[in-house]
Every structure is written in structure tokens, then in C-alpha cells.
Amino acid sequence: MTVREMIHRLVAFDTVSRQSNLALIEFVQDYLAGLGVDSRLVPSDDGDKANLYATVGPAVPGGVVLSGHTDVVPVDGQPWSSDPFELTERDGRLYGRGTCDMKGFIAIALALVPEMKDLKKPIHLALSYDEEVGCLGAPAMIRELVASLPAPQAVIVGEPTSMQVVTAHKGVTAIRSQVTGFEVHSSQPQRGVNAVSYASRLIQHLDTLARQRAEAGGMDGFDPPYTTIHVGPVQGGTALNIVPRHCEFLWDIRHVPGDDPAAIVEGVVAYCRRELIPAMQSVAPDTGISTEVLARVPALAGEDDNPATALARQLTGENATHCVAFGAEAGQFQEAGFATVVCGPGSIDQAHQPDEYISLEQVAGGETFLRQLIAWLS
């Protein structure tokens, strides 16, 4: 199967994170089995999704892990010019959801498996689920890799970097805050506790923290070069004539390596206990604010001298290394003790966009990169 054919097959699987990825995983498992390669699944707790990992070549130390996620972001409400789950070629580009982020990289690796017959050190394929909703799937697989694989010398996470060598990315912490007020008729607001109003005060506090981080600066190489705090969806209230009892919102922290997102969350919880909750409970004792961490993705700390970085530089011919603001599973691999780098085809500028695409030039660059890796390990 050619690389283009493999991209076509993978894009056709609707693996938006809210849905199962098992059809794609079963296809990959069957494909590898047809080439004589055994694979193992690491399912989610509910069995609706699964990670897959496989070893091509001898089971000896010193191999390389090629890591990619199988889930994609939704297409709802986006003005696509073609079917997002049908690969379309136009003007030197391959369009479809996931072509760039990051089924293109996975497809290249899978299509080149038949060329891995002479490996002296192995290539380990590691495909995850639910990266797009907080890197939730990879940790269970990484634990198995640590326990069962002969120690690899490097992990290459194939997120779209335009084939540049990325040695650092921001970490991500996703949080939900829920405000419980006391509902009364809106003609008597002084008797109630308006959950939306208190949520807005908390959001204003988060905006203040965000401005303070921006003014303090941070770490060169990132854009922006500081830890950010962002408020996303907000939901609250039931009717205009009812003082809202409930309001909740999601927010995230994208932190530079070395910053501590847990300290930010703890500070926010302390602010609520000190400044907001006492005033709420002076009116109604059962009111309050809860804050829950939904997901935590560690940052990838820059290591220009580790084996993964040295290998990626050798394969790309690039001496420069880069930092990116998006989060990835690379930080989880590094946290588990693996030398890790991010390098893959396509540009993050096209990721999550309507008419997402990967250029044929980037596909060719990814093929060259992995063929050089195969030759090096052979």
C-alpha cells in the first residue's frame, strides 16, 4: 500500500475524539498481522477505544518509538470545501480531517513497514487515543512500553512541525470550575446568590492572573513566551426571571517548562475560599465553588543533548531546535524517562482548521525522514 493510499484509508475513519477509534485500530492490527507483525492493544476502561503498539524488527535495546495519535478534532460547523473524511487532492495538497494532525505521519510509518525487513534495531509503533481531549489515552500505553519493551534510545512524536526538530512544548492543564448559588425570583436578587455573577468574578480573577503572567514574561523560544490562562465555554442559568443557581466553565493553563500549573490552581482555590465563598455562604450556607482538574499534560522540557534530539538532527540535517506552544504526548514520554523529540510532516497552522491539509512536499519530507531512520537502524 502506498503512502497516499494509507492516508486515504486512515482519513476515512471518523475518529473524532467523542467516538470510538476501534475500527481504525482493528484495520491497523490486521494490516500489521498481514506483514507478520504482532501488535498489542491497551484499551480504555470502557473498552470503546484502544491504544496499539507493535515492534518491527528484533526485540533488542536501542530502537526508536514512532508515536502518533489516532483521534481528530470535530468538523462540526466548519465550512469545508470537500468531505472531511474523504481524502481530496488539490493543487499539491491532500485535504481531509487528520491529514496534518496527525494521520499523515502514522500513514507514512505504516506504509513503510514493508521496507523495515532488515532492521538491526527495532522500530516500535505507538498509536494512542484521546490526545485531542487531554492526552488521556497515552499514559496507560506508556506504562506498558516501560514495562515490556527493550529500552529504546529515542521516541519521535510525529506531530506536525514542518519537519523541524522540536525539543520543548508547553504543558496543558484543563480545569472545570462549578459555582453553586441560591435561586430566587429575579425581582428579589438580594435574597439569592447569583452563580453567574460569582462565576464572572472568578473569571475576572483568572484574567488578572493571565495579565500578570504576560507582564512577567517567561521563556524565550515560545510564542507567546509565558504561561497562559484561558477561559473557554461558560454555561449557567435557566431563565431570565430566576437568579441562577448553577454556572460552570472550563479553563486551561498552558505552561512553559519549569512553571507549576498546580500552584496556579491551588491559588485560585484559595482565592475562592478567601474572597468569594464566605460572601456566598453568608446568604445561603449550601452555596460554594468547586474546582476540578480534568486533564494534565506535562511540558516537554528542552534537551538539546539527548539521543532523540541528536538523532532527529542527523535525520533532518538541521542543527536548529525549536519550541512550540501546543501540548503533545511528548511530555508524557519524557516524564516516563524516554529521550523524546517532536518532529513530523505538515504545519500546525493547518491543524484543526476547515479544509485541513498536508502538502505533498511535506509528505515526501516525512517519507525521506523515516526512510533514513530505517536505513540508520538497519
Image (cartoon, rainbow, N blue to C red):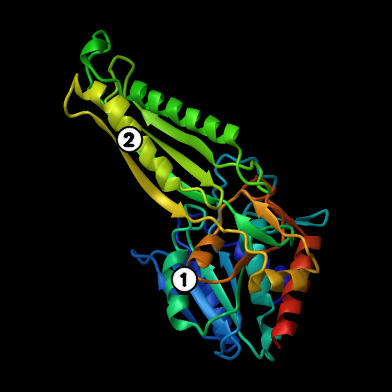
Q: Is 291 above or below relative to 284?
A: below
Label 2, secondary structure: give it: helix
Instruction: Kindly identify which residue carries mark 1.
Output: 142
Q: Is residue 236 left or right of residue 180?
A: right
* CB atoms of marks 2 and 1 within 8 Å: no
Q: Is 242 above or below relative to 249?
A: above
Q: Is residue 142 left or right of residue 12?
A: left
Instruction: Kindly identify which residue carries mark 2.
Output: 270
Q: Nearer the viewer, residue 25 or 64?
A: 64
Q: Nearer the viewer, residue 113 or 218?
A: 218
Label 2: few (<14), some (14–19) or many (≥20) C-alpha neighbours in 10 Å: few
Q: Is residue 184 left or right of residue 300?
A: left
Indicate the position of residue 245 as horizontal and vertical percent values.
26, 25
Q: Is residue 85 visible?
A: no
Indicate the position of residue 312 as horizontal and vertical percent values.
71, 70
Label 1, secondary structure: give it: helix
Task: Give the amino acid at mark 1.
Answer: Ile
Q: Residue at x 61, y 38 (%)?
A: 217
Task: Give the amino acid at mark 2.
Answer: Ala
Tell which circle, 2 or 1, labels the residue nearer the N-terminal end.
Answer: 1
Quadrant placement of the C terminus:
bottom right
Which quarter of the picture shows residue 112?
A: bottom right
From mark 2 to mark 1, how far is it between C-alphas? Answer: 34 Å
Q: Nearer the viewer, residue 233 or 61?
A: 61
Q: Nearer the viewer, mark 2 or mark 1?
A: 2
Indicate the position of residue 366 as horizontal and vertical percent values.
74, 68
